[in-house]
Amino acid sequence: MTSADEHQPAGDRPEPPAPAEGRRTQETAGSSPVRAGSRVVIIGGGPGGYEAALVAAQLGARVSVVERQGMGGAAVLTDVVPSKTLIATAEWMTATDQSAELGIRGGAEGASVDMAAVNRRVLTLAARQSQDIRARLEREGVRVVDGVGRLVGDLRADGTRIVRARTEDGEEDLVAEIVLVATGAHPRVLPDALPDGERILTWAQMYNLTELPEHLVVVGSGVTGAEFAGAYNGLGVPVTLVSSRDRVLPGEDEDAAELIETVFRRRGMNVLSRSRAAAVRRVGDGVEVELTDGRVIAASHCLLAVGGVPNTEGLGLEDVGVALTEQGHVRVDRVSRTTAVRVYAAGDCTGVLPLASVAAMQGRIAMWHALGDAVAPLDLDAVTANIFTAPEIATIGVTERDVQEGKVDAVVTQLPLARNPRAKMLGIREGFVKVMADRHSGAVIGGVVVAPRASELIFPLAIAVTQRITVDQLANVFTIYPSLTGSIAEAARTLHQTGN
């Protein structure tokens, strides 16, 4: 999903979830366990909602999911699945960058992009994924209600609540012992840059395009902005990226972000650092993007990638005792509980981490906890994240910044991929592997991979972090020769401490 963008001041970001006792403790539903057969109503059918529904059904609950957009929510229909499908198309173009070096003639110069066909495929795949999710839920006995849900009234004497679903056929009251709110977020816009769906666009509207932009301005250089800027640049579109910080991807590993910005510039992208958009105006068949320093950029299209706003209005949350942050996110603890009895929340509406994988885990944890199953609280140190630029950036665990600031006592190593034999064969010149290990125990506590398909290559490091594997244990695992994963083992070997 999206991440907190540079246009969102640090002080305005949602607070982390309240701590739960213990790092990997077992918890149950507490003094009022809820048995199998209980009624569960989930508001929102995105990753947090549908994964929670599957767990609840597995545990014997009677489950209803109220979803207004289509199963999978924005993640499947307008965000994660569509954007990564678009990026996959762009990869075919960027993969030809080193074609001459590999002895292939023609390369990208001989290729063209049919934007209408690309977006038809994007939306078709998203719709199929949504249908597959719905079919799976229905096979498991989950009832899917097409509509908008909200909480009505206080907790009743019998311990149930009412979720009122507004559908095309009218209103229906659903009785629940357990409620999960998983309503996601929507794109944030600027007061003087209102989207029109044609030339001024949010990320959810980019799939309406039938032709490639003549010049695309992307406002915001966080994860969403960088991914779209890189994808359209890969498709051959002149791109201007407006970043208010010193570099793109300000919240990411500094070496990785610097490399990506270098790649962007090398591929012809115009990156405007320390620049902020004041307004975006529609001018005929194009747009004008006015910066706060007075500069005006003329372009055919503008994408606003300035973060997200939680979908928590109109749900009746505060009326039933659910506390929200100043930014409108639902306050939750590490087992997804809100401040209202047996009301849970998961996903982007909580502001914990804007990742589909985190939303799904929050939803599962909520149901395991609510229905009395054993559960470990959410551990953000074990979350893997990936940015789908070219090359990709994948991360896990402790960051190098944590080490530099003295938050953890660790050693760090970094190896460039350019010296890896498999990378040479594939024409990969840019990228690296970085590993952080506890100085005393040698346990792997963090890692960064910048490479094509880094989202796949991070898996060995993710296992090492979650299982507390030492660098020596990781180094002693056989790797294929030649392979990109060989660099992970090599990095681990460089951290060997004699006598450890």
Image (cartoon, rainbow, N blue to C red):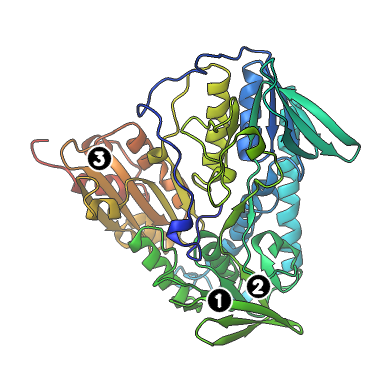
Label pair 1/2, CB-CB below 8 angstroms: yes
Horizontally, residue 458 falls left or right of residue 28, namely left
Label pair 3/1, CB-CB below 8 angstroms: no
Can residue 389 be seen in the rendering of this structure? Answer: no
Q: Quadrant of the C terminus?
A: top left
Q: Earlier in the sequence, mark 3 or mark 2?
A: 2
Look at the numbered disc 1 and give the secondary structure of its residue: strand
Label pair 3/2, CB-CB below 8 angstroms: no
On screen, 411 above or below 33? below
Look at the numbered disc 3 and give the secondary structure of its residue: helix
Coordinates of residue 74 in the picture (x, y in percent): 67, 49
325 vs 415, nearest the viewer? 325
Residue at image point 33% right, 38% down: 465
Look at the numbered disc 2 and give the secondary structure of its residue: loop
Coordinates of residue 13 in the picture (x, y in percent): 48, 54
The residue where tag 2 is placed is 193
Q: Amino acid at mark 2?
A: Ala
Can residue 470 be seen in the rendering of this structure? Answer: yes
Q: Earlier in the sequence, mark 3 or mark 1?
A: 1
Horizontally, residue 20 falls left or right of residue 497, namely right
Coordinates of residue 124 in the picture (x, y in percent): 76, 51
The residue where tag 1 is placed is 277
Residue 417: which quarter of the image?
A: bottom left
Q: Amino acid at mark 3?
A: Ala
**Residues at marks 3 and 1, CA–CA distance in whole angstroms:** 48 Å
